[in-house]
Amino acid sequence: MQWRWSSLVNPGRAIPPGIQALTGITNEMVAAAPPFADIATEVLQRLGDRQFIAHNARFDYSFIRQEFARVGIRFVRRPLCTVRLARNLYPGLGRYNLDTLIERLDLHCEKRHRAMPDADALLQLWRRMGRDFAPSRIALAVDAVLARPALPPQLAADTIDDLPDVPGVYRFYAGDGALLYVGKARRLRDRVGAHFQKLPRAGKALRLAQQTAHIEYERCAGEVGALLRELRWVREAAPVYNRRLRANPLRCSWLFAGASDAPRLVALADLKLQSGEDAFGCYQNERAARRALESLARQQRVCLKVLGLERGMGGCFALQVDQCDGACIGRAATAPHLLRAKLAMASQRLQRWPYPGPMLLCERSHERSDFHLLDDWRHLQSFAVDSTDHAQSDLQAMLEPWLEHRDLPPFDPDQYRILRRAVKTAEMIDPGALRGSFRS
């Protein structure tokens, strides 16, 4: 059998212009090429039990595993990543992409981003390593790159290999079915595997790993969906090892309604951030909220009476010790005091919902798109759609009952924290203007 072999593959869809420009492979070139299903058996035979090696191996490995899975073949290997191998052997290069290694290590590649020329470059890299390092040193580096998690005996040896290399959420269960832990991951295989690598001799991490007998996961198109699912699952099921997100201890916030009105405490659950009012801070209870505002007021010489923190007739106590300019007795305007308090609390201000109504936050992967329906920093529902022609109509049908039912769930500070970061850079779509929002 030839040790060098390559074939174009018909992907069954149009090649995006950017990929054509990068690789030089056009739609015309693959029109008569076989689909992967027609060459899958030959590819498997040629691979045999050989080591799977690639630059940024997780990317290539995940794709070939997926293509084999489409035709009913279970393909499991321990991929050797030459990015990680080069980083181990040549520290200090800064970047380890193939272009950098070609330049820095005097390799040759006629056509970058084509399979056979890139494979030839990796063969040159391997030979260069053989000239630069003793076999024992290379063996140590390979062992470090291929190091596998030490799984407890109750988990199958290929548990980690079977996980996809995509964003998602995962759940660890004990042998009796009790939910132990919920986590989120940008790459499920790496994150779950990390739970079983370099375990301490004692502590929570070791106990969790030893008790885990079963792992379940759910794919997501992106990190926002994974974070939202993790939060929901933890709140609903209260896993043993998820203490931070199990309950939300924050209960109230200060609401400044008008320029001359004292702030009032409002329950976070009822908070709405679509109006002209400004909310500041999230506190566990009224006592903590009052203590925080009082401390700030004393630092900024803001009248406690104007803020509603001090009762009684006449001027405030600070006025008697010359620490107040007399807003409490009408000697000065109250609005500047309140403005000074708001400016001092600026870092705690809860951002207003930047849209007039509900919006869809979109996350896309090569497999699917996830649309998260949001309103006033609340997550209402998520919808997963594929890239077929029916996707838009399917999404519209799924959205209708949620858009008609406008009751908002309670405000959740943890959810707000996730969404506040996400909407700054995410693709946002008005549910009423979906036409043209689906890209091929």
Image (spheres, rainbow, N blue to C red):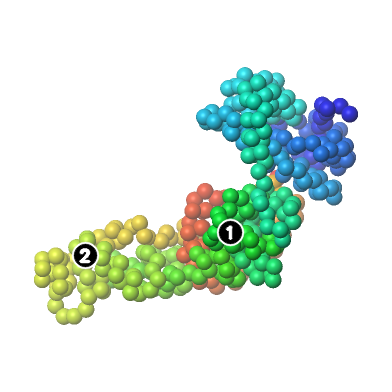
The mark nearer the N terminus, 1 or 2, is 1
- Between 304 and 200, which is closer to the camera in this rendering? 200
The answer to whether 215 is drawn above or below residue 64 in the figure is: below
The crowding category of the residue bearing disc 2, from other C-alpha atoms within 10 Å (few below 14, some 14 to 19, many at least 20), is some
Residue that badge 1 annotates: 206
Image quadrant holding the N terminus, namely: top right
Element type at mark 1: helix
- Between 414 and 179, which is closer to the camera in this rendering? 179
The answer to whether 211 is drawn above or below residue 369 in the figure is: below
Q: Which mark is residue 161?
A: none
Q: Amino acid at mark 2?
A: Arg
Compared across the picture, whether 89 is left or right of 300 comes to: right
Query: Where residue 407 sits in the image (x, y, percent)?
Result: 55, 73
Label 1 vs label 2: CA separation?
47 Å
Query: Where residue 49 sits in the image (x, y, percent)?
Result: 81, 39
The crowding category of the residue bearing disc 1, from other C-alpha atoms within 10 Å (few below 14, some 14 to 19, many at least 20), is some
The residue drawn where x is 25% and y is 70% is 307
Residue that badge 2 annotates: 298
The answer to whether 315 is drawn above or below residue 421 in the figure is: below
Q: Is residue 149 at least partly visible in the picture? A: yes
Image quadrant holding the C terminus, namely: top right
Query: Where residue 320 sits in the image (x, y, percent)?
Result: 10, 71
Q: Amino acid at mark 1?
A: Leu
Query: Where residue 380 sits in the image (x, y, percent)?
Result: 58, 66
